[in-house]
Amino acid sequence: MQLKHYLQFTDLGREEYEYVFERARWMKRAFKQYRQYWPFADRTLAMIFDKNSTRTRLSFEAGMNQLGGTSIYLSTRDMQLGRGEPVEDSARVISRMVDLIMIRTYEHDILRRFAQHSRVPVINGLTDEYHPCQIMGDIFTFIEHRENIAGKIVAWIGDVNNMCNSWLQAAEVFDFKVHVSAPPGYEVNPEQIGLIGTKNFEMFSSPHEAVKNVDLVTTDVWTSMGFEAEAEQRKADFADFCVDAEMMTLADENAVFMHCLPAHRGEEVTADVIDGPQSVVWEEAENRLHTQKALMEYLLLGKIQDT
Ligand code: CP
Ligand code: NVA
């Protein structure tokens, strides 16, 4: 099988996502019914973390376990990679010992270089620029609620970060629109994320205008990991970009609210929204597990017959 990495959302096409989602639905049912499915007996996933994580580590580790395989948690605090061993050498060595590698790191270029020197599939577990696994889980969750995302409108309120970039890439693949509302100085740069000539997003200076009649309202922390030095400035810059109940009333009445978590209630979202009836954040978190299991199966085994 040809080596396939998952570094950005656009690394899979629409038809591949549809296949992965079908497998994720099957795996979700099997998991809920305590049915064993162990295609990864004797397979190992290495997970390299250069940043903190709860959901990503848990979903990959539990997921690998549920598929009959093993995972190894590696923190760059303990690895030679964290003491200056070249990314390329680390990739050559690690990929001779395991079947699959997931990395959470800073610049996307680190991940790209790692993948270039890996003999096994590499998965992006979040970089400064992208978080494709989360958006895959989010789109799966949206489809569970509303059947289809094509033709719908997503409002992204707040920081134009890794999550926002992956939403914008997903809009190209699944053919929906993204309304982005961010303060001056934090605008989208479509060329930087490979979206030349895209018609699938629109910038709004007012978050209230951006959410009008949309099908999904979503946001994220104002200060992502790695940007902590800017936290105070960002709190001031984003003060008018909190998703609150009044803002939600402007969206479609069936609109859902999403947040990749962890959240800061009272900053990017109020408690009544994230803990309210339109919020699907816990399902979003759970679906990381099911979709990533299906992704790992696809990257390692390709398309298989339903079991
Ligand atoms: N949403 C997400 O990726 O969460 P973690 O940072 O806890 O992995
Ligand atoms: N944008 C956030 C997402 C955390 C899952 C960050 O990068 O810190």
Image (cartoon, rainbow, N blue to C red):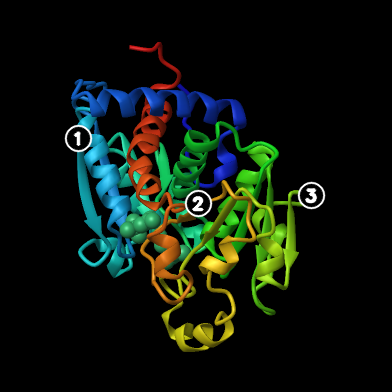
Q: Nearer the viewer, residue 52 or 75?
A: 52
Vertical side of 84 occupied by 60: above or below? above
Q: CA distance from mark 2 to mark 3?
A: 27 Å
The residue shown at (36%, 22%) is 26
Q: Residues within 10 Å of mark 1 (few under 14, many from 20)?
A: some
Q: Between disc 2 and disc 3, whose residue precedes?
A: 2
**Which numbered disc, 1 or 2, marks the residue closer to the eye?**
1
Residue 224 position, x and y percent, is 45, 70
Position of residue 57 in the picture relative to residue 145 (left or right): left
Q: Between disc 1 and disc 2, whose residue precedes?
A: 1
The residue shown at (33%, 68%) is 84
Work out which quarter of the rendered image holds the C terminus and state it.
top left
Query: Quarter-wise, where is residue 172 in the image?
Result: top right
The residue shown at (39%, 26%) is 25
Q: Quadrant of ligand 2?
A: bottom left
Q: Is mark 1 within 8 Å of ligand 1?
A: no
Count the numbered circles shown.
Answer: 3
Q: Residues within 10 Å of mark 2 (few under 14, many from 20)?
A: some
- Say what amino acid the circle numbered 1 marks: Asn
Residue corresponding to mark 3 = 199
Q: CA distance from mark 1 to mark 2?
A: 27 Å
Residue corresponding to mark 2 = 112
Residue 65 is labelled as: 1
Q: Between disc 1 and disc 3, whose residue precedes?
A: 1
Position of residue 31 in the picture relative to residue 137 (left or right): left
